[in-house]
Amino acid sequence: MVSLTPIQLILTFFLAGLSLKIADYLGEKGLKLKAYLTSTISAFLFWILIKNDPQSSTIICSIIIGCLLSLKVDKPNLLLGLILILALSIFLGFSTPVFWLLLVLTLVVILDEFTHEKFAQKGGFSIFFRFRMFLKIAVIILFLVNFLSLTHLLGFLLFDLSYDFLGLYLEE
């Protein structure tokens, strides 16, 4: 275990969300060197979260698996990040995810990605789908029923919101 303090854990989630969005954006823009560097940083932050504790590992692994199954790891720099996460986990260790929670959250990630692709640009509830609200709601519910701690709730929300808000900024 890495044993981050609650503040360090929340900050790591936040930085992981930012770095993932930057890596995704740079990969889309074809800025290869910067995209690979940012993906490396992002992978390291993801691994720290995977190594830290079972709840963080569950959240991050569900995002990785859900995005893989949704075919969202679609750029070479993101594939490099995935390979680095796997290598760090194999050689330096990881915290075992909570299996049932991993399964539930992975399914919610897949639902979010599917509905994001289909409905994010259509009227009505498009903002709900654009910002992948299913996972946010699921994590809040899991906190309310005491399956996730407040630290993990805040960490995840900062991860997700930093990804979303940076995406809005980069679109302008």
Image (cartoon, helix red, strand yellow):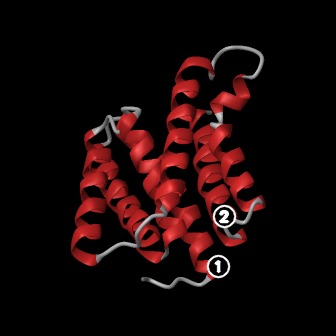
117, above or below 36, in the image = above
- Identify residue for label 1: 7
9, above or below 25, in the image = below
Earlier in the chain: of badge 1 and badge 2, it is: 1
On residue 147, which mark appears? 2
On residue 28, which mark appears? none
Q: Residue at x 38, y 67 (%)?
A: 47
Q: Amino acid at mark 1?
A: Ile
What x and y, as percent, mark residue 16? 49, 60
Quadrant location of the N terminus in the rendered image: bottom left
Which is more toward the observer, 145 or 168? 145
Q: Residue at x 33, y 48 (%)?
A: 35
Q: Are marks 1 and 2 in contact (CB under 8 Å)?
A: no
Label 2 SS: loop
What x and y, as percent, mark residue 116? 57, 27
Q: Residue at x 49, y 63 (%)?
A: 98
Q: Is residue 36 left or right of residue 103?
A: left
Which is more toward the observer, 42 or 92? 92
Q: Residues within 10 Å of mark 1 (few under 14, many from 20)?
A: few
Q: Is residue 64 left or right of residue 171?
A: left
Q: Nearer the viewer, mark 1 or mark 2?
A: 2
Label 1 SS: helix
Q: Residues within 10 Å of mark 2 (few under 14, many from 20)?
A: some
Q: Is residue 125 left or right of residue 113?
A: right
